[in-house]
Image: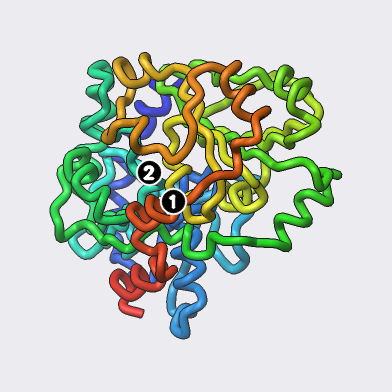
Amino acid sequence: MKALRTIIKKVLFKTVYPIFRLCPIRRNYVLFNCNNGKVFDGNPKAIFEELRNKQNANQYKFIVTASNGVVIPENVHRVRYMSLAYIFYLAVSKYWVININAFSGVNPRKDQVFLQTWHGTPLKKIGADIQDTSRSTEKEEWRKDALNWTYFLSNGSRSNPFYKSAFGLSDNQILTYGLPRNDRLGDNKQLYDSFRKERGISKNQKVILYAPTFRDDGSQIQFNYEEFSKKLGSKFYLLVNFHRLYVEKGLGNFPNVEFNEHLSITDCMEVSDLLITDYSSVFFDYSILNRPMIFYPYDYNRYMNEERGTYMEYSSTVPGPICYSFDSLVRQLMSEDNSKHDNSQIAREFNANYERRDASEKIVSKVFGL
């Protein structure tokens, strides 16, 4: 199926796309693509909201890539990914705001602006630096896509050498402003309280956000939800948020375990008291909240040596206890040593907008001149 989709893309971009490129560029059109329309969230949405709130926002036509059922703001034009309408707007929109690979068949025109917002902070290796040597085709896709980026949005200067290595970027392309999606990340008491009330979570229970990253081989996440529910359900409520590429079905129903379907990752962070993750960059964002974290890299050796690998030495980078097995994770959670934390240093080091939450404002000023 994936191979068929790739063939269809190539055909469309060799036939229809060149025809649409003959049309004049619409200098007030802004096309947003977040995860190919699976959601409208993250950095693209934060930039959209900042742009929409500007005094001269009514001069722009906003086009949002969104599948059926995906909630998008009012007064924007919805297009499905890889539809003829999507290809048309890609060909004529002055601005592209995209957070993933736009496909190497796409070539912006001279006067188009391609803002690559990216979607995280590199702990695990990305682009050309991925450890797995069998993924040469994917790496080549990223290399070609990066050649088209007018701007690349960086979470902070600490990560810039990794972006340069992964994508071959120059200093002029990189905007070190921080991630717009974190501009409003903070203590949201109203959301925190309503989440607990709606689910009947007791005052004695802490909410854990479990946010594992995607395994490139497609393997299932190793977490015993039934055992967690039996041993720890009275102390914790587990909110599981899978990576956007991960599809796991038939998990079952377990008391005090919820598989997130509606909340954004920002919402998930704000309603939780504790984070469990592995190699996901979510912990860099979570550090802004200065709440405790536990790391569960159960497949450490394989991930480091055969799949992605990491840019920084894992044990000295992650700000929390590391549990390499589910049993050790359970023991850690049953202990009372889950409240000690001070993540302010790593939050400052990896988030350029930690002190001043102005990434969205800076981007709109730089890219759109507003």
Residue assigned mark 1: 33
The image's mark for residue 64 is none
- In the image, is residue 212 above or below residue 47? above
Q: Amino acid at mark 2?
A: Ile
Quarter of the view holding residue 242: top right
Mark 1 or 2: in front is 2
Residue 112 visible? yes
Q: Residue furthest bottom?
A: 55
> Residue 55 versus residue 31: which sits nearer the camera?
55
- In the image, is residue 252 above or below residue 127? above
Check disc 2 and report its element: helix, strand or loop. loop
Q: Amino acid at mark 1?
A: Asn
Cα separation, mark 1 vs mark 2, equals: 8 Å
Query: Looking at the picture, how far across and down is residue 39, in whole percent?
Result: 55, 47
- In the image, is residue 103 above or below residue 176? above
- The residue at the point 74 percent across, 31 percent down is 257
Instruction: Count how many numbered circles sit on residues in the image.
Output: 2
The answer to which of marks 1 and 2 sits earlier in the sequence is 1
Label 2 crowd bin: few (<14), some (14–19), many (20+), radius 10 Å: some
Label 1 crowd bin: few (<14), some (14–19), many (20+), radius 10 Å: many
Residue 89 visible? no
- The residue at the point 47 percent across, 71 percent down is 50
Check disc 1 and report its element: helix, strand or loop. strand
Q: Are marks 1 and 2 in contact (CB under 8 Å)?
A: yes
Query: Looking at the picture, how far across and down is residue 234, in whole percent?
Result: 80, 31
Report the quarter where the C terminus lies: bottom left
> Residue 51 versus residue 217: which sits nearer the camera?
217
- The residue at the point 36 percent across, 28 percent down is 6
- The residue at the point 78 percent across, 56 percent down is 194
The image's mark for residue 100 is 2
Query: Looking at the picture, how far across and down is residue 189, in whole percent?
Result: 70, 62
Give left or right: position of 275 versus 229: left
